[in-house]
Every structure is written in structure tokens, then in C-alpha cells.
Image: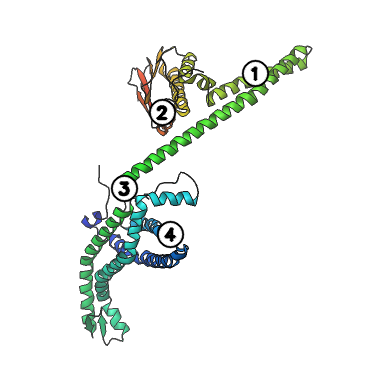
Amino acid sequence: MDAAPTPWHPLTTPTYLRSSTPWRAAAYLAGSALTGIPVLLGIVLLAGAGAVLSVVLVGLPLLALLCLVGVPTAAVERRRLRLVDPAPAPGPHRTPAEPGLLAWGRLRFREQATWRELAYAVLHGFVLWWLDLAAVAVLLWPPLGMIGAPLQLALSGGEEARIVKLWLITSYPAAFALAAAGLVLLPALLYPLGALAAARAALTRALLAPREGELRDRLTEVTRSRARLVEAFEAERRRIERDLHDGAQQRLVALTMSLGLARLDAPPGPLADQLARAHDEAGRVLTELRELIHGIHPQVLSDYGLPGALSDVAERSAVPVETDIAEGLPRLPAAVEAAAYFACSEALANTDRHSGASRASLAARHDGSVLLIDVRDDGRGGADPAAGSGLTGLADRLAVLDGTLTITSPRGGPTVLSLEIPCTAVSSSSGP
């Protein structure tokens, strides 16, 4: 695997001088003043006003704002870094758990990254941008001035011109000779310019990019946020299921009964035939609605937990299924139970549609920290999750829960679907 590109890498390539890298390096160093000057002024003004007004407590908010001056500075500097460093430099800050400016401020003051960014802002405002400009001036001004010697001589009327305050020329041959020397000198100086820009970028990354621990914290935060989204999704599924079960389904049952009674009371004829058709259609709609409700969130899963739901899906399978569900399987988080149930439902549906199996088995257990389920059939094998079986979507759903879906299906069978979901028990009982 190739190493990630760094700001130093272009300096080692033979195409360095022909690329835009030297000029991006110059733009990166020269552009430092565009952020350094405002930062310097901001620090001086906030520090001065805060110190003067702190005696009447009005300056305390200004001093607090001074501590946060590195946050916007760092955000701009991480963007400027792209001129010379192709590797992404994400922000090191976490997202507050609560909305509002107060929650944001509390979190920022507790983060080490905030103080690193403040140190960078002070260093950048008082030292770095001066050095960056000086480096560009020392390395580019002499050769560019020498290259422009003929033009300067022409602008002076062709009499004399002083080039970069060092050489006095009075003739065009001398001007063109100096220009030729500048053309030779410029490529040689572009290498130290690129090296300085790379070193400057390395310093910026060291202070402003997230550390390993901060990346770990952000990953944990993303994982928790993802889990909360899954929980909210499952809660919404259960709400829709309850609304359909207690509302639309009950109304359809009442309508079906009313049509049935009207059908019995109607005399034979066209009206009775229409009532019969309406009664049959209402029955079909009710059946479809019940299947839809079961697909959204099976009631047996809510009432009896995962053991009862897995037993139910095994009984409804067209292929005979032998179940081995560990005794005392606990109640697990709702999102975990739902994901496991639908994964097993999809696996057994695929067994019926594609495998040609005569028998299947379903085993489930929980070892205290991980839910383990295996679905096996004696079919022809050769299952391909990428062939539109629906298992890819289930694998993505399990991934949200940090779970894994593994399929082993050699030609000739057997096919084994194994799923693992890290989770802890919600309660020790799986009963209603």
C-alpha cells in the first residue's frame, strides 16, 4: 500500500519545477500575512480592552473571547494547508451534546485542542507570518528582480537602473545578462522555498490536526450518534406499527364485518354480488395490511422478545427449519432485536427462493456481550450477496450497530449466514 502523500513528496520528484507546487508553496507562505495580520490585531485589541475593562468585570467576556481566538484561526489555517499538503486535516473538536452557545463554549474550554489552537494563533500572529513573508522575499525577490532587469532599465529611460538594491546597470547587454542569471538562480531557490513551505505545513498540522485520542473520541461520538439514530428509527417504526394496528386495522375489521352482515341481509341479485365483491376486497386489504404491519415491526417481537420472534419466523418458513435458541436468551436493545429478526427473515426467505434446500437450521445465543446467530441450509450454495438478495442492505444495517454479517456459500452448499452484534442485555427475561 502506498504511503499517504506529504508536503515533502513533490520535492523528490523530477517534475517539481514543471508543476504548480513551487508557486503554491509561495502562495502559502505569502498568504500567511492575510491571516497573521488580523490575528495579531485581534489578539492585541482583545487583550488590551479585556485588561483595561476587567476592573469593572466588563472585560472578562473579552478575555474569554481571547482564549477562543484560535478556533476560527485554526479553521482558516487548516483550509490554507491544502495549498501544499494534500492529506486532509479535519477539525479536532467534538460536537456539543446540547444545542446553544453556552454548551458549545463549555465544551471548547475543556478541550486540549482549543489551547493548542490558541498557542498557534499567538505564534502565528507575532512570529510566523513575519518569517513566512521574509522567506518569500529573500528567496524570490532577487531572482525575479534580476529577470525583470531589462524592463526596469526600459522604464528608467534606458539610462540606468538599480536591481534589487544591489546592482547598477546602465546598458541592455548587462540587463539581459542579469536576467539570464536570474533565470538560472530562480529554479535553484524554488527548492528551499518548497522545503520551507513543507516545514511550515508540518508545524501547522502538528498543532492544529487532531491527535490520536481526539480522533478516538470523535469516532466514539459518531458511533453513539449513529446508535441514537437507529434507536429513534426503531421507535418510529414501532409507533407506525401501533398506529396501523390500533387504528387502520381496527377500522378495516369493522368495515369487513359490516359488509359481511350487509351481504347476508341483501336479497339475491346485483346488489348482493357487489356486496360480496366488496367484502372479499376488504378481506384482501386487511390481509395485506396485517402483512405490512408485520413487516414494519412484528408484534411478537415486542411481546415475546427475540426467541419468540425467531421461533415465529421459523414456523412461517416454507422450508422446514430446526431451531436451537439458547434457553434464557435475554431481552436485548430494540434496535438489535429488530435487526436480528429481519436478517433471519431475509435469510430464510432467500433459502426458500434461491437455495433449493430441503431443510434449514437457526441457532441463536448471547454470550453476555455479543449476540450470535447462525442460519444454515442444505441447498445448492453459491449465494452472492451482491446479486440483489437483500443481504447487502442488512449488512449495512448491522454495521450501524457495529455488527457483522458473514456468508459462507461454496458451490454445492451448505450456505451459512452468521451474524454478530455487540450488545448487552436489557433484562434477563424474554417473556411477555
Q: Residue furthest right?
A: 267
Given the image, on which type of amino acid does mark 3 rest? Arg
**Nearer the camera: disc 1 or disc 4:** 4
Mark 1–mark 3 Cα distance, whole angstroms, equals 62 Å
Which residue position is annotated with label 2? 387
Q: Dot 1 surroundings within 10 Å: few (below 14), some, or many (20 or more)?
A: some
Given the image, on which type of amino acid does mark 2 rest? Ala
The answer to which quarter of the image holds residue 375 is top left
Along the line of sight, the residue nearer the viewer: 119 or 380: 119
Depicted 237 relative to depicted 300: above or below: below
> Could you tell me residue 256's position as x and y percent?
69, 18
Residue 19 in view? no
Given the image, on which type of amino acid does mark 4 rest? Leu
Mark 3–mark 4 Cα distance, whole angstroms, equals 24 Å
Which residue position is annotated with label 3? 211
Q: Earlier in the sequence, mark 1 or mark 3?
A: 3
Q: Dot 2 surroundings within 10 Å: few (below 14), some, or many (20 or more)?
A: few
The answer to which quarter of the image holds residue 355 is top left
Depicted 260 relative to depicted 14: above or below: above
Mark 1 residue element: helix
Q: Is residue 407 left or right of residue 147?
A: right
Mark 1–mark 2 Cα distance, whole angstroms, equals 35 Å
> Could you tell me residue 381's position as x and y percent?
36, 19
**Nearer the camera: disc 4 or disc 2:** 4
Which residue position is annotated with label 4? 65
Q: Are marks 4 and 2 in contact (CB under 8 Å)?
A: no
Q: Earlier in the sequence, mark 4 or mark 2?
A: 4
Which residue position is annotated with label 1? 283
Q: Are marks 1 and 3 in contact (CB under 8 Å)?
A: no
